[in-house]
Amino acid sequence: MNRIRNFCIIAHIDHGKSTLADRLLELTSTLSARDMENQVLDDMDLEKEKGITIKSHAIQMNYNGYRLNLIDTPGHVDFSYEVSRSIAACEGALLVVDATQGVQAQTISNLYMAIDHGLEIIPILNKIDMDSAQPDIVADEICDLLGCDPDDIFRVSARTGEGVPPILDAIVEKIPAPKGDPEAPLQALIFDSVFNSFRGVIAYFKVSNGSVRKGDKVKFVATGMEYEVEEVGSLKMKLMPGTEVGCGDVGYIITGIKSAVEVKVGDTITHTARPCENAIAGFEEVKPMVFAGMYPVQADKFEELRSVLEKFQLNDASFVYEPESSLALGSGFRCGFLGLLHLEIVQERLYREFDMDVITTVPNVSYKVYTMQGEVLDVHNPSGLPAPTLIDHIEEPYIRAQIISKTEFFGPIMKLCLDRRGTLVSQHYITADRVELNYDMPLSEIVFDFYDKLKTISKGYASFDYHITQYRPAKLVKLDILLNGEPADALSTLIHEDNAYTFGRKMCEKLKDLIPRQQFDIPIQAAIGAKIIARETVKQVRKDVTAKCYGGDVTRKRKLLEKQKEGKKRMRQIGTVQVPQSAFMAVLKLDS
């Protein structure tokens, strides 16, 4: 056990975590030069395309007789749950800070998460080879944050490899070996799992006490299910089978589980014959921030979508779902996400990894509705709202937003936050040209495009982090979209009264461009209750029925036109309007 070190790499998005991991893998000869590529641990096509880490990746390295278990983590706020799970399986963390950007919002929130778990922090200043780097100024920021000495900070360039070798020695010297009793009953924490169509569920775990061998009878504490261990081993670039995973080590286990629901991330594994007394305190339950409906494009694919979501949830424990039905779209699932980027990534991964095409409805947040009878309802979906006469008041979730930016963007950022019903709580200058702003804002105001807008007005410099604080009363109304007089419930939203008219107007204009023309006029209306607040019309495609009449009496033309008019009237009564998927996605990108 004294020769094991478990550590993770934490940082703000795009500060060079995966590149640093590449250099560590090279220095420990974990990969041959032929297999080496940029961001080698980001094995999803989507991660390489977007240049971000979406999943935590665990890998084992050998260095001077020590076993180093590294977990590379994501940096985006939407994937912070992955970070919290990685931290629970480690004793130390490398805190990476970009020398050109300085300390940013996710740097601070990930650091606090690591400190709360009692991890040993090794500060690293990356990208010192860049022309715009300010290593001394940023080093001072890190010292203020950690209370460390400037000499304790490693100055490196993960891209060129400069200054990286001493980090390996620091990991061995500074990060403590895992604690635990090899003779005690087995106690292991599952921190991730994947589904393999040939082997079943593969669970990644860290052993806190005892050890697990191939052929052992084990029990999963949360579900109470018992299995025989078919295979255990360590996590290299590929799974490396072994005979035993010892105390303090990280590995994988295959028990032939075929049903995804039998494995829960955060569960404890123990022996059947000699179980441990207590389960390990897992992770806090994830709280979804954004809810949206997911429906199969073909109605008969509902059961297929259910099994796909079950398998997907294994790989992404922060994703939650429950069945629901919609008038317009049939049977589907109400899904909870940690943010809009998370929603976009889930939709893309379902298509690429499982070949499952889904329709996603307009996202919204969860509200608390207080009825006249004194009941409190959690409403995730506008269609679940009681009748207006039964509602006493509605409360919406508020967040504390932390924005760190250059002082030159101070004005535009304040205006953006005020436009989104934000209240300034505090402002504080980190250095002469960097400011930290704290705002109280409704979560619903940041769900759509707040982060994109913030990046645009700050030229990509501002960083943003938030956490839910409380629920507050709000003047909310349900905005319905009517197509040809029929409500399209998938486009309904709960919105603040002051923004309803503008949002309804823009929705109608956008849908007018996206809905294909039919043989009859399609009115698109935005309504609050029975009151119509905006309207657009998709004009009909007109067939020239009088083309065959040349000359002759005008009554012949009239007769043909009247006949056409009757047909259109009948068609309009029975005609249905198909809403393309692009319409649902375009609503998210409405320019507020």
Image: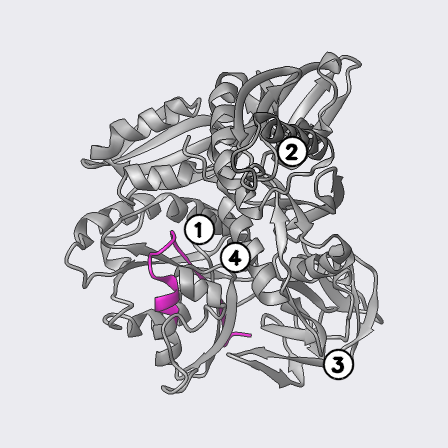
Name the residue at 66% across, 53% down: 282
Give, as a three-letter code, the residue at label 3: Glu
Distance, label 1 to label 4, CA atoms, is 16 Å
**On the rendered structure, is 237 left or right of 430?**
right
* Residue tagged 3: 230
- Between disc 2 and disc 4, the foreground one is 2
Residue 15 drawn above or below residue 456: below
* Residue tagged 1: 76
Q: Earlier in the sequence, mark 2 or mark 3?
A: 3
Q: Earlier in the sequence, mark 2 or mark 4?
A: 4
Q: Are marks 1 and 3 in contact (CB under 8 Å)?
A: no
Residue 87 — which label?
A: 4
Distance, label 3 to label 4, CA atoms, is 28 Å
Q: Earlier in the sequence, mark 2 or mark 1?
A: 1
Dot 3 falls on a residue whose secondary structure is loop
Dot 4 falls on a residue whose secondary structure is helix
Neighbourhood count class around disc 1 (C-alpha, 10 Å): few under 14, some 14–19, many 20 upward = many
